[in-house]
Amino acid sequence: MAENAQLAVARRATSGKGAARSLRRLGKLPGVLYGRGRETAPITIDAVAFQRLLAKGGVSSTLMDVTVDKGKPVQALIRELQRNPLRPEDILHVDLYEVHAGEKIQLSVPIHLVGSPEGVRNDGGVLDHSLRELEVKVLPRNIPQLVDLDVTALGIGDALYVRDIQVGDVEILNDPDIAVCSVVAPRAVEEVVVTAEEGEEIEGAEVEEAAEPELIRKPKAEEETEEQ
């Protein structure tokens, strides 16, 4: 089994939006560590180290050994990330949940599609990946980093469903009839008549149907949520 990710954190004595802003200016992230049988502990996390951990992917299913103030490590999962609504890459707050070896936990696991569908290779179809995460209940030692699903045999109009996923020692919570992915036919290219500026008609020109313009509004600034 792969080694757990390592994360060192420190206890913090301050709380509130002002204190959280000060921490972030110092390259720290405010957060909490909680779980069954333990008191919620406000913590700080090194922002660079945490971003490096996130860059490895599988955030929701990454089991970590969390060390608080150089104490004995505890196993924990990332339960929630609060992000800046205007700059989603900026993390505002982190919730870590301590897990126990004999306690099943519920979490999301990424679905990884393996192979190139027959309908894409030979018929120009498009692979539509509609369900990207699987909700599971599992013991910490059996948490999969991701779930593989082979799509090689899919032709045009074929689909794979939650019921087609096989994962050992894992209880899948999603509706088995939900489609995970499908291969759809390519969009038809319409034959239209284009009118030139001089009024001449050019027949037989093939152009893609013009998309409606996307209306983009500048989002209103949102206040940060109250933080511990």
Image: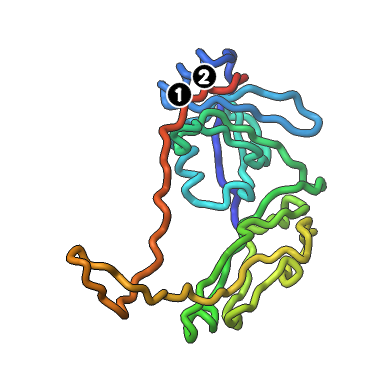
Kind of element beneath mark 1: helix
Q: Residue furthest left?
A: 198
Which quadrant, please, contains the N terminus? bottom right
Residue 21, above or below 49? above
Image quarter of residue 148? bottom right
Instruction: Give me the residue at 45% from left, 38% from top.
Output: 89
Residue contact between numbered discs 2 and 1, judged by CB atoms under 8 Å: yes
Colour logic: rainbow
Q: Is residue 161 left or right of residue 157?
A: right
Instruction: Give me the residue at 46% from left, 80% from top.
Output: 124
The residue type indicated by label 1 comes to Arg
| Mark sitting on residue 20 | 2
Which quadrant, please, contains the C terminus? top right
Q: Which residue is mark 1?
A: 24
Depth check: give the residue in front, 207 or 115: 207
The residue type indicated by label 2 comes to Ala
Can you give x and y, in whole percent of width and height, for residue 152 in the image? 57, 80
Can you give x and y, in whole percent of width and height, for residue 88 in the image? 47, 37
Can you give x and y, in whole percent of width and height, for residue 18 in the image? 50, 13
